[in-house]
Image (cartoon, helix red, strand yellow):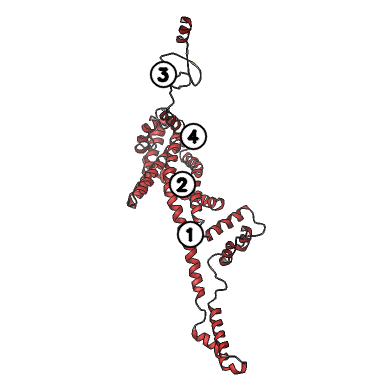
Amino acid sequence: MEDQSLTTTNAPLHCQNCDSILNESFEFCPNCGQKTNDQLTIGVLFYNTISNYFSFDARFFKSFAPLMFKPGYLAEKFLQGKRLLYLHPAQMYLFISVLFFFILSFTTRELVHEANVINEKVVQSEFGSVANDSLKPKLDSTQVEQLMKPLKENQNVLGLKDSDLKMADSLIKLESANPRNVNTSWDFDKEKVDSLLAVGADKDVIYKEMGMSDDAGFIERRLYKRMLSLAEGKGAGSIVQAFFDSIPISMFFLLPFFALILNLFYYNKGKYVHHLVFSFYFFSFLFMVFSILFGINYLYKDTPGWISWLIAFSTYFYFLFALIRFYKQHWLLTWIKSGLISFVFLLLVIPTTAGILMMFSFLTT
């Protein structure tokens, strides 16, 4: 019994993760880094989840102030080799972008609802106003009387009774007021399309009534599907939702393209990956600023608009100072380059991307 107890007491400690032999004084495994006594609790579970996927640890808080108030500092330090002291640029971008789109989702829901309401009102008001105009008699009482005059003068010759004249008068007025074909700004007969929808007609029949060709391809069919939903007064919200859902995808193209623009203007200031590091931190800053703005505007509806515009405009000066620190060129030359880079990116790249996103959201929802 004593030998068995001695054997158990002197048994070597093993890491629960990699099974490496540990010294009793070790708090962390020297092979894999896991704590030697890592008891599973709710706090440990969620901390590990956030830390592993978003690196939400002390490095984020240590990196937050330099990111917001020291333009270009984090990118500069990362290239100098300080890559564990501060949060990795891609991890910083990932975490803040997730936070940004989470906050943006509250605003998106309101915009989707407003878009649906406006779409419905436009359809109703447009069709209603046109229908009301069509219901107005095309002939006034004088014109009706002129049409009835030959009938009254030749009543005996034609063998018409007074009741026949009254019926003729009523038919002329009814025919004048009856809208046989209500025309709207749509390129199809909306009244007939609404009738087909009411009887549950097949969508292909409705699309062809709207003008779709018999051999329509995927894009044309999606186009008519979206037109039909808009005509029903319920398609605008889904387009807005799809547009916002496509923004994260677009950022995977915009951010590398922004780094490419920097590479063109600073071709002698390092490799493309250096400009990519700068872009990751700069876009993280932009997402954080707009996360704060959207959050404030959502909580406080009466926030003056000029404050939001002022903060948004200040991001340009952040960009200017970041370029000066990171690329270390004269401020005047950097100011000229910053203006050109902003011009190319804002006036060429973003509108083109927004147009592609709008087309994508219009055709794929």
- Using residue 150 as the reference point, say whether residue 107 is left or right of it: left
Q: Earlier in the sequence, mark 2 or mark 1?
A: 1
Q: CA distance from mark 3 to mark 2?
A: 50 Å
**Pointer 2: what residue?**
345
* Camera-nearest label, 3 or 4: 3
- Nearer-the-camera pick, 130 or 10: 10
Sequence-wise, the earlier of marks 3 and 4 is 3
Number of residues whose C-alpha sits closer than 10 Å to that of mark 1, classed few (under 14), some (14–19) or many (20 or more): many
- Indicate the amino acid at tag 1: Asn
Asked whether residue 191 appears in the rendered view, the answer is yes
150 versus 172 height, above or below: below
Q: CA distance from mark 4 to mark 1?
A: 46 Å
Question: Is any part of residue 269 visible from this angle?
Answer: no
- Counting residues from the start of the chain, the first of labels 3 and 2 encountered is 3
Q: Are marks 3 and 2 in contact (CB under 8 Å)?
A: no
- Residue at 42 percent across and 16 percent down: it is 26
Q: Earlier in the sequence, mark 2 or mark 4?
A: 4
Instruction: Check disc 4 and report the residue beneath it.
Output: 273
Q: Is there a contact, CB below 8 Å, between mark 3 and mark 4?
A: no
Residue 136 position within the rendered picture, expressed as x and y whole percent measured from the top left: 49, 76
The residue lying toward the viewer, choosing from 3 and 136, is 3
Q: Tell me residue 191's x, y (percent).
A: 56, 67
Q: Amino acid at mark 2?
A: Phe
